[in-house]
């Protein structure tokens, strides 16, 4: 059984998220998703929705076998505990594959790091970014 881990913020789900998680699931047999804690989302605006709500909705997707809110301080602690076979990074995630591989090796975790593919819009107006959905809401409702 090949265990795959995916991770992200997943604030206001859209079809890009569904694509990423299906792609990650297709890399193996079992998919666990780590949902980033609000306080750890520092590279962009913090999520609108609470940790548990983002976790619950991700857990309800077909591709997802299990979803959990991430560790507050050590992002490698859940990886160490679950010992997955593959970490599937999102196509645009800022994480450096080599740095993650180095840390996995340092901790003695035998796990491959891969990148998932991107999905573009399939029709005029399809919005595949939480940030852009929020911008649209602000434009149209103010
Ligand atoms: C291997 C890995 C493990 C992670 N584990 C956690 C975690 O335990 N807790 C957490 O809050 N975030 C965790 N993160 C999520 C990062 O915080 C996340 O990349 C970022 O905040 C959200 O990025 P996004 O822009 O793709 O949504 C992890 C990221 C990676 C690459
Ligand atoms: N169009 C897409 N195609 C493939 N993967 C996507 C797409 N949109 C988001 N993802 C992936 O989903 C994961 C979680 O994304 P995240 O929660 O950062 O949402 P986002 O919509 O990309 O956010 P924002 O655009 O506001 O920064 C990331 O790994 C990201 O690469």
Image: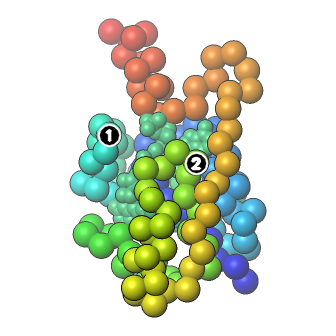
Instruction: Look at the numbered disc 2 and say if its residue's Cβ is closer than 8 Å to ligand 2.
Output: yes
Asked if residue 121 lies left or right of residue 34, the reply is right
Within 10 Å of the Cα at label 1, are there few (<14), some (14-19), or many (20+) other Cα atoms?
few
User: CB at mark 1 closer than 8 A to ligand 2?
Assistant: yes
Q: Residue at x 67, y 48 (%)?
A: 117
Image coordinates of residue 16 in percent, x first then y, are 61, 40
Residue 10 at least partly seen: no
SS for callout 1: loop
Q: Which mark is nearer the camera, 2 or 1?
A: 2
Report the residue marked by disc 2: 91
**Residue 107 visible in the picture:** yes
Quote the CA–CA distance across marks 2 and 1: 17 Å
Residue 121: image location, x then y, percent: 68, 27
Q: Residue at x 43, y 56 (%)?
A: 95
Q: Which residue is mark 1?
A: 44
Q: Is residue 138 left or right of residue 14?
A: left
Could you classify mark 2 by the number of other residues whose Cα lies within 10 Å: few (under 14), some (14-19), or many (20 or more)? Answer: few
Q: Residue at x 70, y 79 (%)?
A: 2
Provide residue 34's location: percent of width, then percent of height: 46, 64
């Amino acid at each position: 059984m090949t265990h795959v881990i995916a991770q992200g913020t997943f604030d206001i789900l859209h079809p890009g998220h569904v694509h990423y998680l299906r792609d990650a699931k297709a890399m193996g047999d079992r998919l666990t998703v780590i949902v980033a804690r609000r306080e750890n989302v520092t590279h962009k605006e913090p999520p609108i929705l609470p940790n548990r709500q983002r976790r619950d909705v991700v857990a309800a997707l077909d591709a997802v076998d299990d979803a959990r809110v991430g560790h507050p301080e050590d992002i490698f602690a859940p990886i160490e505990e679950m010992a997955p076979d593959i970490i599937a990074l999102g196509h645009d995630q800022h994480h450096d594959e080599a740095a993650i591989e180095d840390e996995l090796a340092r901790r003695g975790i035998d796990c491959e790091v891969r990148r998932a593919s991107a999905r573009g819009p399939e029709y005029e107006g399809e919005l595949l970014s939480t940030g852009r959905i929020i911008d649209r809401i602000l434009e149209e409702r103010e």
